[in-house]
Amino acid sequence: MIAVATLVLLAFHGAQASSVDPIQKVLQMIGDLQGKIMGEGTGAQKVYDEFSEFCEDRSRELGFEIKTGKAGVKDLSAAIAKEAATADSLNAKIEELSSAIATDEADLKAATGIRTKEQAAFEAEEKELVDVIGTVERAIGILEKELSKGGASMMQLQSANSVAQALGVMVEATSLSSADASQLTALLQSSQASADSSDELGAPAAAVYKGQSGGIIATMQDLYDKGEAQLAEARKKETQNVQAFQMLSQSLEDEIKYGNKDMDKAKKALAVSAETKATAEGDLEVTSKDLAEDIKALATLHQDCMRGAEDFEAETKSRGEELNALATAKKIISESTSGAAGQSYSFMQMTMSSGTDLANFEAVRFVRYLAHKEQSTALAQLASRMSATMRMHGNNQDIFAKVKGLISSMIEKLLAEAQADATEKAYCDKEMAETETKKADKEAAIEKLSTSIDSMTAKSATLKGEVATLQKELAALARAQAEMDKVRAEEKAAFDVNSAEMKKGVKGIQLALKVLREYYAKDAAHSSADGAGSGIIGLLEVCESDFSKGLAEMIAAEESAASEYETTSKENAIVKATKDQDVKYKTKEAKGLDKDTAEATGDMAGVQEELDAVNEYYKGIKGRCIAKAETHEDRVARRTAEIAGLKEALSILDGEAMFLQRSTQHALRGMRIQAHA
């Protein structure tokens, strides 16, 4: 603007040298200035169009990113809650499997210990029975050999008063070792004691064998048969015990094997769930951070774009007003100065008058332009006072001082306002920061409580669903156990009836065989002829074997069924106890979660009330500190521009005053030279 005033003054001085009409020169300069302003407007419009397009594109991009970020945060939060619930379920399952495996391993260890003791006892019994049977078999062979030879040994055997004496004769004849004789004597005494305790079977006393070598052989044969039967029974029982142990151990080993597999799967799934959760938490942190940055960027972009639009509108309006003022001035000058231009004035008066008016006009115009640009009512009022002062004082030489005084007063006023605004800004910054911190804390607390409530609600629902499933499984298990109890009771009742019949049949066959054997053993003549007695005895022996075999199979089947029933019942009891505990703990945990959810809901309501109060205060403080036509930064920038502009106006007045003073002195010297000439 100083350049414009200088150009105008130079035009006056140029007119002095070249005799060009100063009015025409001013009109030419106004036209040039109009062209320059319109060129600046065209360039500014192009820049603003590009800026507006950028704002729209960037706003659309940020809106899409914010929408995507919010959806991502929601999905990741749901994924984290899901993985947390999955981890809790897997931990419970791992604990349950560990308990079941430990129980099965303890049962297997106990069963193995029992089996080891049973096997050792069987091996000892088997060895003893094999030795006894071998000894009896050798004694029978010796007796049969001696009977076939006859002689002195036969006579001594027949004269023996007891089996013990007969064995002593055999020892003296070196037919039998003393150790075998002692073992047979002990065995006979044990057998005799057993016979005495079962007189109802009609077992003969030892005196029956007195003097009868054939009776000794029968006695030995009876011992041999009993030993064989006892050995077979022991081996059969051992076989049953081995089978039962194998079934039990196989069942327990299978349970341990599959339990370990299930636990490995659960642990792997838990690791995968933890990794997935950690990944989701990391993604959530990054996504949340990006979302906050996008929201902040969108708000900043909106403010910048609005400020840019306002600035462009103000500049456009200012250019329009300036062009309108220039056109009006140009029209006025053209229409009103044509007559005055022809009048004659002294060069000194024209220079002084035109220069002073032009300097003041330029200062007023500059202040008015500054008022339009900054939209300042105070500057507009200052321009009006400056214009009024110039009209009142006319061409008074003190006009510069008065105008400069108005401008200096305005600068001091703006500086005072800046100081007061800085104090208000400090207060607003402090209150806004503290309030925003409280607001963020309350919102974070609500978000945390909301997330906790959602997580606890989801976990409670999961637990309640698991409890319902467990209760259904327990009901099914109870029905299965009741059905199994019923079947086992029916099997046991049938076994009691059938086994009693079989035992009765075996005893009857054995008693009949004993009677017949004793009868035919008294006299060999009874068993001659057609051998009918031997045939009957043989057939009865076959029946006894069949009955004994049937009874043994019946007992084995009953024992196997009973063992399987006991094993299954025990397993069911363990499963029931485990599931009952699960129902108890999960129900308790669900109730605790419901209680915690209710408490958290109450806490969130209290925090929400506090947040509402903070928001209300925040709204008031924003109305005081933010909800204004312009921000503190804008006001500072505007005042800075106004003060700089007013200082520039002062410099215009100072510069034009010095220029006019030099021009006046130069003109006076020229007049003096012309006068002397």
Image: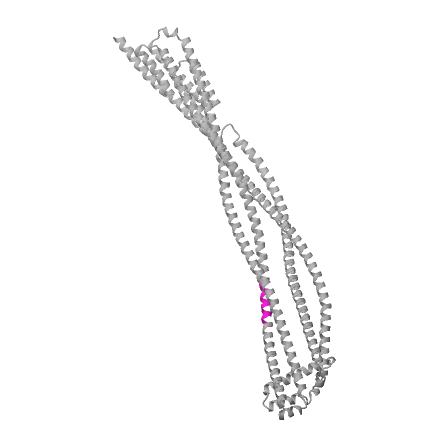
Q: Point out residue 560 in the picture as x, y percentages from the top left corner.
A: 65, 66
In the picture shown, does residue 574 fall above or below 69? below
Overall secondary structure of the magenta stretch?
helix
Queried whether the magenta region covers residue 356, the answer comes back as: no
Name the residue rendered at 65%, 76% in the picture. Answer: 229
Q: Is residue 269 left or right of residue 322?
A: right
The residue positioned farthest toward the left in the image shown: 677
**Residue 3 lies in quadrant:** top left
Q: Out of 577 and 386, give the one closest to the viewer.
A: 577
At horizontal 65% and vertical 56% (from top left) the residue drawn is 580
Quadrant where the N terminus is found in the figure: top left
Q: Quadrant of residue 544?
A: bottom right
What residue range appears in magenta?
105-117
Any part of residue 550 in sight: yes
Viewer-nearest residue: 284 or 129: 129
Determine the residue located farthest toward the front in the rendered image.
530
Picture quarter with the C terminus: top left
